[in-house]
Image: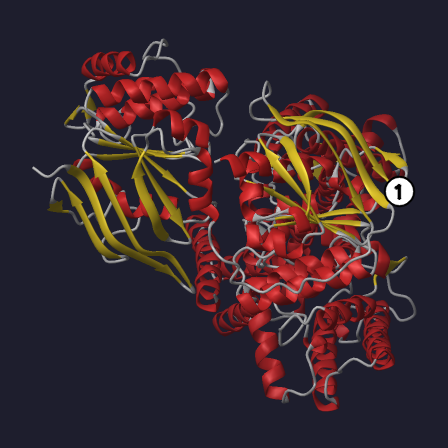
Amino acid sequence: MISKVKSEQSPIEIIKLSLRNNFRQYTMFIALIGIMIIFSALSDFFLTPRNLSTLFLQTAHIAVLACGVVLVIVAGHIDLSIGALVGFTGAVVAILPARFGIGIIPSIIITIAVGALVGLWQGYWVAYREVPAFIVTLAGMMILNGLLLGVTKGETVATSGVFNKIGGGYLPNLFIQSTPRDMIPHDTTVIIGLLVIGAYLWMEFSRRKERIKYGFDILPMSLFITKIVLVIALISAIFSVMALYLGIPYSILILMLVGSLYTFLTTKTTFGRHVYAIGGNKEAAKLSGINIKQRTLWIFISSGILGAIGGIIYTARVGSAAASAGVGMELDVIAAAIIGGTSTLGGEGTIIGAIIGALVMSTLNNGMLLLDVGTTQRLIVRGLVLLIAVWIDISSRKKGA
Amino acid sequence: MSEYILEMQEIVKEFPGVKALDNVNLKVKRGEIHALVGENGAGKSTLMKVLSGVYPYGKYTGQILINGVEQRFNTIKDSEAAGVGIIYQELTLVKQMNICENIFLGSEFEKFGVIDWNRAMAETNRLIKEVGLSSGPDTRIVNLGIGKQQLVEIAKALSKNIKILILDEPTAALNETDSENLLSIIKALKKEGITCIYISHKLKEVKAIADTITILRDGRTIESYPNNELVDQSKIITGMVGRELKQLFPRQEHTPGDVVLEVKNWNVYNPELPDRKAIDNVSFNARKGEILGVAGLMGSGRTELMMSLFGAYGINKTGEIIIDNELVKVKEPRDAIEKGLCYLSEDRKKTGLVLMMDIKENITLSNLNKISNIMGINENEEIKAANEYVKALKIKTPSIEQKVKNLSGGNQQKVVIAKWLMAKPKVLVLDEPTRGIDVGAKFEIYNIMNKLADQGVSIIMISSELPEVLGMSDRILVMHEGKISTELDWKDADQETIMYYATGQQPRTLKELEEV
């Protein structure tokens, strides 16, 4: 949080302090850029808009799920049922139209409600019956796997083309038809990109104005401009990649909405603050008057809802629901959150970090696939990356202390 | 062989900033029961940790002689090998294991890593007979009462062929019958030739069982004498408290207003020992703008009383809490906070602060609704509020974004106080508010307390430091074994009177004193 630092310090000191305070996020971000540079050197295809868009598509559901699990892990719990929930809700959203002729929108709403109910069930056992989350969600994983087998009856259920757009489709053109070959940017994507930049600028300036009103220190103008320019460049880069291919995928739009909402939840709301306090020191949180049980219940409901959304995106991308869907996905999701700086001990972690973590994992996967690295080696590399990321974090903390 | 089995000479042990032991001498005769008494923090437990090797040789200065031979213990194993066994107040048994497994934990009869259970069982049978335990060697610890667990600890110590048995507050958690049983076991062990060092706050027990009594105060040996008919409890108490008031307290006259908190017939049971009353029919009140001191020895129920009122301790609670003439129901701390009763816990790191959060987040933790609107937490309002308290309480920090784990003890304590001030309490309970804080910061916290009292807040201060209780309080409640044994006006109170009530005695009247 650069803008909170006192302005009496020189710009370099401010940057140093900010780097130190957000060490994990910055290292992972730099690592992500580093990985991308290495892959683009090794493979001509890696940095093309087409491949990067595919990369985003591959990341979307993991990143959405990671947002939910960040809350769970920050509060000091764990959710092992995410993969099974993805499989089960995926089956629900596929079967409702296929077997019962329910429309796509109502099916989606019902599926999200089912996810919320699963979260309510697990949250109840964790919060009010005080069974450890590890056990509750392990049991939940088995139960959901059983339910998944029951509703699919072992068959694969195909989903409709319209529905599949959620997973693999792109927003339509608004005014000008364009294809990736003619190099005309996708107009809807450009418009949304500009809107995002506009919203960002409005936020930064109104925040600066507010701080002046309160008489607080603000960032020196030079740093303020530098920061804005950097962030805008980053947003533009992401949107140009998508604009130069087929545009924004629906799943990435969903990820952006979920990511923004959860960033707001974790940084700006009482609920979010309480989650961090519970994970940081449960006793102190209790003695500070925080309703730990109710907060825990909502954390799991949130995880259930995001599990359902992840299930919908995943099923739509695959184009069918099967009994094997989602197996082991919880491990990818938890790994993404942890690589992104979420502390396994609770109390620390960010949404943007988890999304970067998800990107790191899928970039590694994507890049190694392009280089024809086998599954064996890919799994080993990803395991080592997780291990080393956490080790770097722990050793940097020891130095700080 | 010398007359003394154990001699500790000129033991000095320093912690950063504090001299916990200052030239302590202790001489224990072979085969006696030697009582070690003193106030909370007098240095008894530290001395025993030096003796048992918890603080290894070199971390203290002075000499330890056993049977006239100098000893240098680096670990507990070393001291055990020399025949010293210690039983702590907090029992250290593995609850899921049985008696036999516990007794030989860490010193199993093994051959190539395989345990000889038959031998262990036979040995256990012998030991549990010696300590008068009726349960079988394969009984699991969870199925034993606290008194029997204590006996298992003793059996475990005996299994190591110890000659000196140290018991640290062994009867603190026991009821009357179990206590008597334990004392008779100790006497029986004495006949077997085992020397016992007995640490206790319960002077009645000390008087009944000890051969010699040594008194520690402020890390020094005050006196040591044989326990004969000339010794009575008042002599012991005088030795325990007889220090002059060294610290200065900013004593202020407060003008107490109406009763703001009234507690009637308050009973609480211990959640870990559900048949034991932690608080026994307590009634008291606190007034607006006064400082009410709560004194008592460790385990007297001071913290339990206040935490149970705050909704953070105890089961099967009965009685009434009345705040501002309104009967309130407190199920959780948040109910108490809402009614204006706040509690600053005695261990700020464990239960007061979220250490990885920064100052402002800790200050606003209980008060987020005051700085939030529909758009969430207003960051600017949060900074403003935190800045106000940092300034008012003189919290020394480069920035309110400093993580509280990087602050000194005094500043950490001020952060917790700030959190509760922001909640605008009517009654603020401060549990050991100056523990582990340097003198300068202590003084500042006393000033804050006075200021709050002037503003009409009712302050309840639990403290183990008698000078602090005497120096700050308007009224003083003294607790003993879950009951309030008396209420004193500060003008009538002195350290000895408080200590009488805290140890469960009646002080003599003036007339009796004249007769002596």
Tell me where residue B456 appears, x and y as whole percent: 83, 56
Image-quadrant location for residue B206: top left
Image-quadrant location for residue B377: bottom right
- Given residues A330 and B304, the one toward you in this image is B304
| Labels in figure, total | 1
Tell me where residue B83 appears, x and y as whole percent: 19, 34
- Given residues A322 and B464, the one toward you in this image is B464
For the view shown, which residue lies furthest in the right direction?
A175
Q: Residues within 10 Å of mark 1 (few under 14, many from 20)?
A: some
Horizontally, is B30 left or right of A29 in the view?
left
Q: Is residue A112 above or below residue B391?
A: above
Which chain is home to disc 1? B
- The residue type indicated by label 1 comes to Asp
Q: Which residue is mark 1?
A: B324
Horizontally, is B231 left or right of B324 in the view?
left
For the view shown, which residue lies furthest in the left direction?
B1
Residue B4 appears in the figure: yes
Residue B97 appears in the figure: no
The secondary element bearing badge 1 is classed as loop
- Given residues A323 and B422, the one toward you in this image is B422
- Given residues B31 and A151, the one toward you in this image is B31
Q: Is residue B493 above or below residue A30?
A: above
Tell me where residue B46 appears, x and y as whole percent: 36, 48
